[in-house]
Every structure is written in C-alpha cells, then in structure tokens.
Image (cartoon, grey):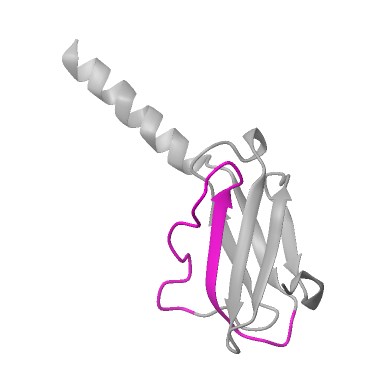
Amino acid sequence: MKKLILVLVLVGMLATSVFADAFNIVNSTNSTFFYVYVSDSRLSNWGDDLLGNQVLSPRETLRVTTPIPIGSTTWDIRIIDDDGDTYTVYNRRIRDGESINVTYDDLD
C-alpha cells in the first residue's frame, strides 16, 4: 500500500512538471537583456533573476514556467538591459503559451 501511494505521489509530481504553465518573453528591442524578473503581482518582491549567467539578445525568446496556474493571477515583469535601462510590465493577465513582446514602449 505504501508503495502504491509513493508511486501515485511521484506520478503526480511528474505530471505537474510536465504540464506546468508557461509563457514566452520576447526581446523586441535592439538591446541585450541582462536581468529578467517575473513575479505574481500580489507579491512585494521580484525574486530571482531568470537569466542567471545568460543574456537575452535582441529577437531571442525566454520561456518562463510558472509555479502556479498562469491564469490564477496577474504578473509583473521587470527587465534590465545592457545600458541599465529598466522595462516594466505591471498587472498583466497572461495565458498559457502566450508570448509577451517587450519593446521600448515598456521602458520606465
């Protein structure tokens, strides 16, 4: 019985990771993005940089997987480019699989 429960838990964890909601951030500028932060709009901090040691060059796409169902909240996106300029999108309702094009219109 314990083995069956363990198997069901593992299958549930695998299904959650395989079917996680995600969206894309597209760099639609001529600048290179050095930092990308995505946060549930209800939270007061940005969390970790999603790029780590990578950069997001012009016309490249970053796939973002969310830890909660994507439609259950609104999202804030903050990006810092190679010149230190920030781009911010607040309270965005995002659909699973949607692409968010970050442009110079999003400059702070």
- Snapshot quadrant of residue 87: bottom right
Side (left or right) of 3 relative to 105:
left
Residue at the image point whose x is 70% and y is 54% from the top: 90
Q: Is residue 48 magenta?
A: yes
Q: Main secondary structure of the magenta part?
A: loop
Place of residue 27 in the rendered image (x, y in percent of width and height, measured from the top left): 69, 75
Q: Residue furthest right?
A: 105
Residue at the image point whose x is 63% and y is 60% from the top: 77
- Snapshot quadrant of residue 62: bottom right
Q: Residue furthest left?
A: 2
Picture layout, residue 97 above or below residue 13: below
Q: Is residue 84 magenta?
A: no
Towards the viewer: 72 or 16? 72
Residue at the image point whose x is 70% and y is 79% from the top: 59
Side (left or right) of 17 relative to 4:
right
Towards the viewer: 103 or 61? 103
Picture layout, residue 45 above or below residue 15: below
Towards the viewer: 102 or 85? 85
Residue at the image point whose x is 32% and y is 22% from the top: 8
Start-end of magenta stretch: 29-54
